[in-house]
């Protein structure tokens, strides 16, 4: 199950939430710090590690 990062638009709190891919578009979250429902998805940088040396 993927973990997505979110940011509260009221207090600026960043937090993570694990959810199924199908739930991602419809999930209704509240900020764990202030309880606001103004939460936006915050894309995280993606880093791939490989074992092959180039």
Image (spheres, rainbow, N blue to C red):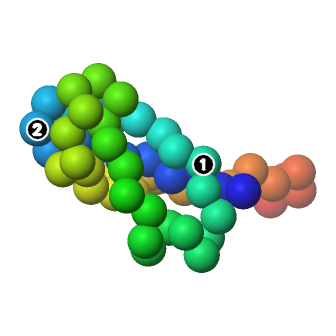
Q: Can you tell which quarter of the image residue 20 is in?
A: bottom right
Which residue sits at x=14%, y=30%? 11
Please give left or right for residue 11 compared with residue 21 in the image. Answer: left
Between 47 and 21, which is closer to the camera in this rendering? 21
In the rendered structure, find residue 4 and report the number of the disc placed on it: none
Residue 43 location in percent, x, y? 39, 57
Residue 28 location in percent, x, y? 37, 58
In the rendered structure, find residue 18 and report the number of the disc placed on it: 1
Dot 2: within a 10 Å radius of its alpha carbon, few (fewer than 14), some, or many (20 or more) residues? few
Residue 24 versus residue 28 in the image, above or below: below
Please give left or right for residue 46 compared with residue 51 in the image. Answer: left
Which residue sits at x=51%, y=52%? 4
Which image quadrant: the N terminus? Answer: bottom right
Residue 26 location in percent, x, y? 43, 71
Name the secondary structure under disc 1: strand
Which residue sits at x=60%, y=48%? 18
Q: How many marks?
A: 2
Give the Cα separation between the discs numbered 1 and 2. 22 Å
Between 14 and 44, which is closer to the camera in this rendering? 14
Instruction: Answer with mark 1 or mark 2, whichever residue precedes in sequence.
Output: 2
Which residue sits at x=29%, y=24%? 33
Q: Which residue is mark 2?
A: 10
Please give left or right for residue 42 compared with residue 12 in the image. Answer: right
Q: Can you tell which quarter of the image residue 12 is in?
A: top left
Residue 18 versus residue 33 in the image, above or below: below
Which image quadrant: the C terminus? Answer: bottom right
Between 13 and 37, which is closer to the camera in this rendering? 37
């Amino acid at each position: 199950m993927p973990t997505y990062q979110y940011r509260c638009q009221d207090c600026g709190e960043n937090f993570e939430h694990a959810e199924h891919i199908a739930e991602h578009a419809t999930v209704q979250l509240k900020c764990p710090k202030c309880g606001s429902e103004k939460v936006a998805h915050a894309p995280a940088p993606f880093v791939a590690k490989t074992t092959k040396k180039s």
